[in-house]
């Protein structure tokens, strides 16, 4: 496939040498990536603290009194929304997308650096607007992260005044930021790859991020319009989503709107959103597994096609979130079918990860531990997804803790494990320092075992009938006493996992100064970001000359080659093996 000559500009980028232009208003994709990541991790910590408070309430409902029922709803809403959008989406695309795309594609920067910079600042604004809702009268919205109307805007719901408006405004601003970044990522992948970097030679990290960005560009508009329409419903009295309602004995002015329309719009965005988070994780984990197992990725082409197929199918499954909405059962059956079809390319990916490990020279480095941990949690989350994807099984399980266990496993824990693995993996390149291996391993085991201790029992609670989004269970007749014991145990596990995040942060911050100096390519990896002339790479990435690519990203342990890896920019030596593209010898 062709590359475009625009990438041929060898002209280096001249850095403006003022502090502000280099670190604050920077147009360097690497600085923007770090800015995005720091803000995302910061709000993520806010969401983590909220979950700790909720867990204390759930585990010890008699002992703790600092969360009241209204706050519980507000915390749940902010926790869910922050984790999904402001942490994971922003970190995978604004953070890793920004850092990796130009470096892995052999480009000097994003195609529109100014817009890239703007994207970060608008994202920061979205975060500030969101957090400001903690400080307004009535507090943040307690509508649940799904924001279903009419409840979201009706008096009686916590934050029904300013809280919900700020949430909707923040989402709209976030989407503006995402669009500016996203157009950059797509254009850079399509237009700015270096010579020889054909699409089918791109590392899977780039494929995953690229496809996720396209999903975002197509899915976020549905959320944007629903946010605008709901804002109008809540402020000037339109009735897009509001049926005739009588609230607290009073008949409101609304009539004729459709709450179900909102659910459709929300999930038309919401389901692809799962893959906006999952596809970058799929891509990155593939590269981690291949590098640390010293083996080429198994079935590269199949992996690319699976990413594309999952991306496409993710737009025709949204109503599996609405089986209990009263929709026609045949309609439900259609969505159950498409949902199960998505399991096929997903399962292919899982098989291929396992086959990549098969007979590999597995190095149990910290990034590798997290990558393998991901395979476990993702399989578990995926299997329970098969339960919930079927209408008849979903009906009794819907809105129970089974769902909470399922989605945390598949789109909470799994992507977070990849985030941690990826941060450890690229830390030496980003900072020029090595992290502390032992602390990294302690962090991994606490997180991995801890999250199982949190989320496996939740499936059991769900089957017993413990409802989701409940502040306290009280003495509910049909729930055995063990439920309370389990809830206390889950809370203790959650506190341990939250504590392990401190070990991670300590390691990341202290290693910046105290870590051993990193060699340019500590993992002996093949992809271009490890072949830069400087570590960390300078503005413009490549010094005077852009790299030229001669092979795919996975020439590990090529028979006959002197080392167990051959970088992508190393010319093919016909005497030796290697230079393979997607597994076919030339
Ligand atoms: C140790 C980490 C975490 C803990 C202890 C935790 C805990 C919780 C708790 C207690 C709830 C409320 C459940 C209920 O009452 O129904 C919840 C909801 C939720 N969490 Fe987490 N969570 C964690 C990480 C994450 C992550 C990484 C994500 C990212 C996807 C996430 C996404 C959500 C969502 C979307 C909801 C649903 C909110 C709603 O029902 O409106 N959580 N979490
Ligand atoms: Cu879904």
Image (tube, rainbow, N blue to C red):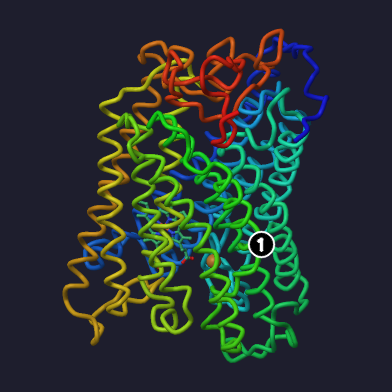
Residue under the image location 62 percent in, 67 percent down: 161
Mark 1 falls on what kind of element? helix
**Can you give x and y, in whole percent of width and height, for residue 360 in the image?**
35, 34
**Can you give x and y, in whole percent of width and height, for residue 518 in the image?**
42, 13
Q: Is residue 261 left or right of residue 47?
A: right
Residue under the image location 48 percent in, 51 percent down: 349
Q: Can residue 497 be seen? A: yes
**Can you give x and y, in whole percent of width and height, for residue 195 in the image?**
73, 22
**Can you give x and y, in whole percent of width and height, for residue 221 in the image?**
74, 59
Q: What residue is disc 1 on?
A: 165
Quadrant of ligand 1 in image = bottom left
Q: Measured along the vertical axis of the image, is residue 259 above or below residue 427?
A: below
Q: Measured along the vertical axis of the image, is residue 443 above or below residue 63?
A: above
Is disc 1 surrounded by few (<14), some (14 to 19) or many (20+) residues within 10 Å? many
Q: Is residue 73 left or right of residue 103?
A: left
Closer to the camera in the image, 322 or 305: 305
Closer to the camera in the image, 171 or 424: 424
Closer to the camera in the image, 394 or 243: 394
Indicate the quadrant where residue 136 lies: bottom right
Looking at the image, the residue that sits furthest to the right is 5
Quarter of the rendering occupied by the N terminus: top right
Quarter of the rendering occupied by the C terminus: top right
Q: Can residue 26 be seen? A: no
């Amino acid at each position: 496939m062709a590359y475009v000559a625009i990438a041929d500009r060898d002209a280096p980028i001249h850095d403006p040498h003022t502090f502000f232009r280099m670190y604050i208003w920077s147009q360097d994709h690497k600085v923007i990536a770090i800015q995005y990541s720091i803000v995302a991790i910061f709000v993520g910590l806010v969401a983590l603290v909220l979950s700790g408070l909720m867990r204390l309430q759930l585990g010890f409902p008699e002992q703790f009194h600092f969360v009241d029922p209204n706050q519980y709803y507000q915390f749940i809403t902010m926790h869910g929304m922050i984790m999904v959008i402001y942490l994971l989406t922003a970190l995978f695309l604004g953070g890793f997308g920004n850092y990796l795309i130009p470096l892995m594609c052999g480009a000097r920067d994003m195609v529109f650096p100014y817009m890239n910079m703007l994207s970060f600042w608008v994202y920061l604004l979205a975060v500030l607007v969101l957090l400001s809702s903690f400080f307004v009268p009535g507090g943040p919205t307690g509508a649940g992260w799904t924001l279903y109307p009419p409840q979201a805007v009706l008096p009686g719901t916590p934050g029904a005044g300013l809280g919900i408006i700020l949430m909707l405004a923040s989402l709209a601003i976030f989407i503006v930021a995402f669009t500016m970044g996203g157009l950059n990522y797509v254009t850079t992948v399509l237009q700015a790859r270096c010579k020889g970097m054909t699409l089918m030679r791109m590392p899977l990290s780039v494929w995953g991020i690229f496809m996720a960005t396209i999903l975002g560009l197509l899915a976020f508009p549905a959320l944007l319009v629903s946010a605008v329409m709901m804002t109008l419903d809540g402020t000037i009295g339109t009735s897009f989503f509001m049926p005739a309602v009588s609230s607290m004995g009073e008949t409101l002015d609304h009539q004729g709107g459709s709450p179900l329309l909102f659910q459709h719009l929300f999930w038309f965005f919401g389901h692809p959103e799962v893959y906006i988070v999952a596809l970058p994780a799929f891509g990155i984990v593939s590269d981690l597994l291949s590098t640390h197992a010293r083996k080429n990725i198994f079935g590269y082409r199949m992996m690319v096609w699976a990413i594309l197929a999952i991306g496409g199918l993710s737009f025709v499954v949204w109503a599996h979130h609405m089986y209990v909405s009263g929709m026609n059962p045949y309609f439900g059956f259609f969505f159950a079918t498409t949902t199960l079809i998505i399991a096929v390319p997903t399962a292919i990916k899982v098989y291929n990860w396992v086959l990549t490990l098969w007979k590999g020279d597995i190095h149990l480095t910290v990034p590798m531990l997290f990558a393998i941990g991901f395979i476990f949690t993702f399989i578990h989350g995926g299997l329970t997804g098969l339960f919930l994807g079927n209408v008849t099984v979903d009906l009794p399980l819907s809105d129970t803790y089974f769902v909470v266990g399922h989605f945390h496993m598949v789109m909470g824990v799994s992507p977070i494990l990849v985030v941690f693995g990826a941060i450890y993996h690229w830390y030496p390149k980003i900072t020029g320092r090595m992290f502390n291996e032992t602390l990294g391993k302690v962090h991994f085991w606490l997180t991995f075992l801890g999250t199982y201790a949190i989320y496996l029992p939740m499936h059991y609670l769900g089957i017993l009938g413990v409802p989701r989004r409940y502040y306290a269970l009280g003495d509910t007749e049909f729930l055995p006493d063990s439920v309370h014991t389990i809830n206390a145990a889950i809370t203790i596990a959650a506190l341990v996992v939250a504590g392990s995040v401190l070990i991670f942060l300590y390691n990341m911050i202290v290693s910046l100064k105290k870590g051993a100096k990193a060699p340019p390519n500590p993992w002996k990896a093949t992809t271009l970001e490890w072949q830069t002339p400087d570590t960390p790479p300078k503005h413009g990435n490549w010094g005077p000359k852009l790299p030229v690519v001669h092979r795919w990203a996975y020439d590990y342990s090529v028979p006959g080659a002197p080392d167990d890896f051959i970088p992508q920019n190393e010319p093919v030596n016909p005497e030796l093996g290697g230079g393979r593209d997607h597994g076919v010898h030339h």
